[in-house]
Image: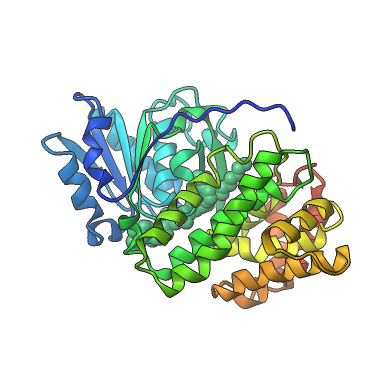
Amino acid sequence: MQNFEFYNPTRILFGKGMIARLDEQLSPEARVLVLYGGASAERSGTLAEVRAALGNRTFREFGGIEANPTYETLMKAVALVREEKLDFLLAVGGGSVMDGTKFVAAAVPYEGEPWDILVSKGKAATKALPLGTVVTLPATGSEMNCLSVISRQSTGDKLLFSNPLVYPRFSVLDPMRTMSLPMKQVINGVVDSFVHVMEQYMTYPVDGMAQDRFSEGLLSSLVEIGPRIVATPDDYDLRSNLMWVATLALNGLIGAGVPHDWSTHMIGHEITAKYHIDHARTLAIVFPALIKVRRAEKRAKLLQYATRVWNLTDGTEDQRIDAAIRKTEEFFEGLGVPTRLSAYEIGAEGINDLVGQLEDHGMTHLGENGDVTLDVSRKILEAAA
Ligand SMILES: NC(=O)c1ccc[n+]([C@@H]2O[C@H](COP(=O)([O-])OP(=O)(O)OC[C@H]3O[C@@H](n4cnc5c(N)ncnc54)[C@H](O)[C@@H]3O)[C@@H](O)[C@H]2O)c1
Ligand SMILES: CCCCCCO
């Protein structure tokens, strides 16, 4: 097991009706901005529940944070917070609203050009406003981590930053608030969570016994939840399990002391930036291709995954690896999520453009050993054609 430091300060309030406990998480004098995305926050009744929970407290609201949140929109929220001297940010939404709120939290006190926070991958931020979240879409785990992905319309960038200052102070996870989700977004959550686990698991063995079994448990849970939640979308217990699995998939626990990959995500971000394909759906394209191209480097964990998650114990090692990769593709495709670039009519020219974007964004050495060079990224994209 590798050395690690684990820190996660986020309080989780989980379950039906927990939004009612919002106000007690806030200091009496907090000057709150509620941030949200599109009409769904209103239509689903979640905003009404949040407003009721905030009772007599005065607060402001900022709506319109897009899916794949943009710097341009978020800077309007920064201006509002500065002008009205607000001092607590409450995100009500999915990963886009939570990530956008984390950026606003870091940008408000920042004295330079806030985009520097992204360019520096978060290092430039030395202060941040406190924030909390009310989660409406289980997928990213943003509710319990210090990561944020922000796009810039003017340049077509989609970059990640992380900084411990933007951990939410608390997050409310009420599975009932996800019932209004289109099934497509529920499925996105299953896929995003699955690949989050893989980025921290499908690397090479370091005898992380607890981390491996924890990750395999999350993967097996998602393999079970996926088809079942499509068949019985109103099942509260399935929604509860998806919500908690999604949070655990990227809150630092399974990733402590083990090598990480993240090249699937970095390549996926470029696909979203260029083609505006849902984040999770880019991962379903890249990940199966990546384990095909990098099966030698990932051989030991692929065999472990085959046995422990898919119960594949017969045949030669290569037959078991082939079967595990096939099962993974079938899992995504079975949820109606394509695993090929051709499903989105992205061809050779698009692959060239994506490799160029990776180079422009300095993504020239990805993966657990930095050996996912541009050539390897190209091979992965070609294997996904
Ligand atoms: N911070 C992280 O750890 C992390 C990890 C992975 C991805 N991301 C980023 O998160 C973003 C994706 O977030 P996401 O997958 O949660 O989707 P999202 O937040 O972009 O939401 C997708 C759509 O669903 C709508 N929606 C949200 N909740 C709803 C509800 N309850 N009912 C009806 N509609 C609802 C939103 O308004 C939006 O239109 C991407 O930008 C991705 O890069 C962040
Ligand atoms: C290093 C963690 C990268 C998380 C990417 C989320 O889209």
Residue 73: tell me if it is visible.
Answer: yes
Give the vertical position of 126 relative to 148 (above or below): above
Residue 6: image location, x then y, percent? 58, 28
Residue lying at 80% horizontally and 57% vertically, measured from the top left: 303
Judged left or right of residue 154, residue 84 is left
Residue 56: image location, x then y, percent? 10, 36
Judged left or right of residue 189, residue 341 is right
Residue 43: image location, x then y, percent? 23, 62
Which is nearer the eye, 61 or 280?
280
Give the vertical position of 327 relative to 146 (above or below): below
Q: Quadrant of residue 333 in the image?
A: bottom right
Which is nearer the eye, 156 or 33?
33
Residue 274: tell me if it is visible.
Answer: no
> What sort of colour scheme is used for the picture?
rainbow
Residue lying at 48% horizontally and 46% vertically, measured from the top left: 247
Q: Quadrant of residue 380 in the image?
A: bottom right
Which is nearer the eye, 209 or 367?
209
Residue 199: image location, x then y, percent? 66, 49
Split into 4 quadrants, where in the image is the C terminus? Answer: bottom right
Split into 4 quadrants, where in the image is the N terminus? Answer: top right
Quarter of the picture for ligand 1? bottom left
